[in-house]
Image: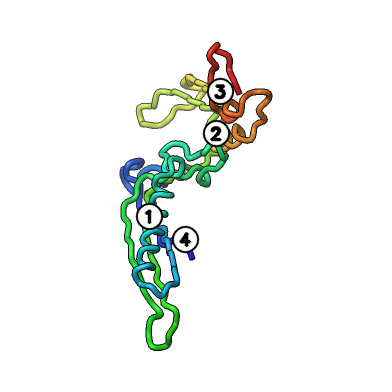
C-alpha cells in the first residue's frame, strides 16, 4: 500500500521579497512536509527489506527526476496538458527523512508487515499583494503661498495655481496559467500537433513545415 500525506506547513516572512516581516505586502516562505508511506506484508524479513528499499527509490526517481514537477518556471507538460495546480513551483528540498518500521511479529502468529516512511520538506514562496479596485485616475493639485501667520489665505486674496492630472488605468495582465491551458486545448486548425501546443513544427528538408 502506498499513502501520501501532507504534514505541517511552516510559513515565515519571505525576506527575499520584503526584507522584513512588517514591511510591504504579505509574502511567505513556505516549508511544508510531504509524507510517503509504503506498507508491505511479507514473512521474509530480507525480501520485505528489499521491496521497501525498491519502493523508496521508485519515489525518489519518479518525482525528483520529473522535469515538469521540478521546473522553476513552467510546470506544464505540453505533451499531456498536465501541470502542477496553479503552476505551483517548488524552490528547494531542504530536508528528507527515511525510516523503516517493522511490526506485528509476536507469539500471536500474525502476518508480519513493514512500513517505509519517507518525509520530505519542500520550500516554495507565495506573495499576497493587495487587490486594488479603486484606481487612481485623477490628481488635483492647488498651489498657494502661505500667509505670514502660517495660514492659507482666502482664494479672493491670493490666486491659486491649479493643476489637474488625468491618469489611465493599465490593462489587466493575463494570467499565464490560463493562457497556457488555452494553448493546450486549442484546435490544431490544420497545423501540426506540436505547433498547436505552442511549439513550432519541425522543418522538412525543403524548409516546409511537416506535421
Q: Which mark is residue 135?
A: 2
Q: Which residue is mark 1?
A: 57
x 31%, y 46%: residue? 20
Q: CA distance from mark 4 to mark 1?
A: 15 Å
Q: CA distance from mark 4 to mark 3?
A: 39 Å
Q: Earlier in the sequence, mark 2 or mark 1?
A: 1
Secondary element at image label 1: helix
Q: Tell me residue 133's x, y (percent).
A: 57, 38
First of labels 3, 1 by sequence position: 1
SS for callout 2 = loop
- Image-quadrant location for residue 113: bottom left
Question: Dot 2: few (<14), some (14–19), or many (≥20) neighbours within 10 Å?
Answer: few
Q: Earlier in the sequence, mark 4 or mark 3?
A: 4
Closer to us: mark 4 or mark 3? Answer: 3
The residue sitting at the bottom extreme is 107
Viewer-proximal residue among 85 and 147: 85
Specify the color scheme.
Answer: rainbow
How crowded is the residue under tag 1: few (<14 C-alpha within 10 Å), some, or many (20+)?
few
Name the spot of residue 39 as percent of width and height, x first.
44, 68
First in residue order: circle 4 vs circle 1: 4
**Which residue is label 4 attached to?**
4
Residue corresponding to mark 3: 201
Q: How many marks?
A: 4
What is the x, y in percent for residue 19? 31, 43
Instruction: Please tell me the numbered disc located at residue 25.
Output: none
Using the rendered image of the protein, determine whether residue 22 is visible from the camera's viewpoint. no
Q: Nearer the viewer, mark 4 or mark 1?
A: 1
Q: Position of residue 30 (x, y in %)?
A: 39, 51
The residue carrying pointer 4 sits among few (fewer than 14), some (14 to 19) or many (20 or more) residues within 10 Å by Cα, namely few
SS state under label 3 = loop
Amino acid at each position: 500500500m502506498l499513502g501520501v500525506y501532507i504534514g505541517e506547513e511552516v510559513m515565515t516572512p519571505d525576506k527575499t521579497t520584503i526584507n522584513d516581516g512588517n514591511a510591504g505586502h504579505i509574502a511567505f516562505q513556505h516549508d511544508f512536509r510531504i509524507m510517503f508511506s509504503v506498507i508491505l506484508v511479507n514473512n521474509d524479513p530480507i525480501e520485505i527489506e528489499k521491496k521497501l528499499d525498491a519502493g523508496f527509490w521508485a519515489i525518489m526517481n519518479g518525482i525528483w527526476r520529473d522535469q515538469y514537477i521540478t521546473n522553476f518556471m513552467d510546470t506544464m507538460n505540453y505533451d499531456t496538458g498536465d501541470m502542477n495546480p496553479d503552476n505551483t513551483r517548488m524552490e528547494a528540498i531542504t530536508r528528507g527523512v527515511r525510516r523503516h518500521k517493522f511490526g506485528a511479529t509476536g507469539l500471536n502468529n500474525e502476518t508480519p508487515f513493514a512500513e517505509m516512511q519517507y518525509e520530505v520538506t519542500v520550500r516554495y514562496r507565495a506573495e499576497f499583494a493587495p487587490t486594488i479596485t479603486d484606481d487612481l485616475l485623477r490628481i488635483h493639485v492647488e498651489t498657494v503661498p502661505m500667509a505670514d501667520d502660517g495660514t492659507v489665505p482666502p482664494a479672493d486674496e491670493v490666486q491659486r495655481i491649479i493643476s489637474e492630472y488625468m491618469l489611465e488605468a493599465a490593462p489587466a495582465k493575463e494570467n499565464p496559467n490560463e493562457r497556457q491551458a488555452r494553448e493546450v486545448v486549442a484546435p490544431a486548425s490544420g497545423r501540426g500537433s506540436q505547433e498547436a501546443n505552442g511549439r513550432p513544427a519541425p522543418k522538412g528538408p525543403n524548409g516546409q513545415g511537416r506535421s
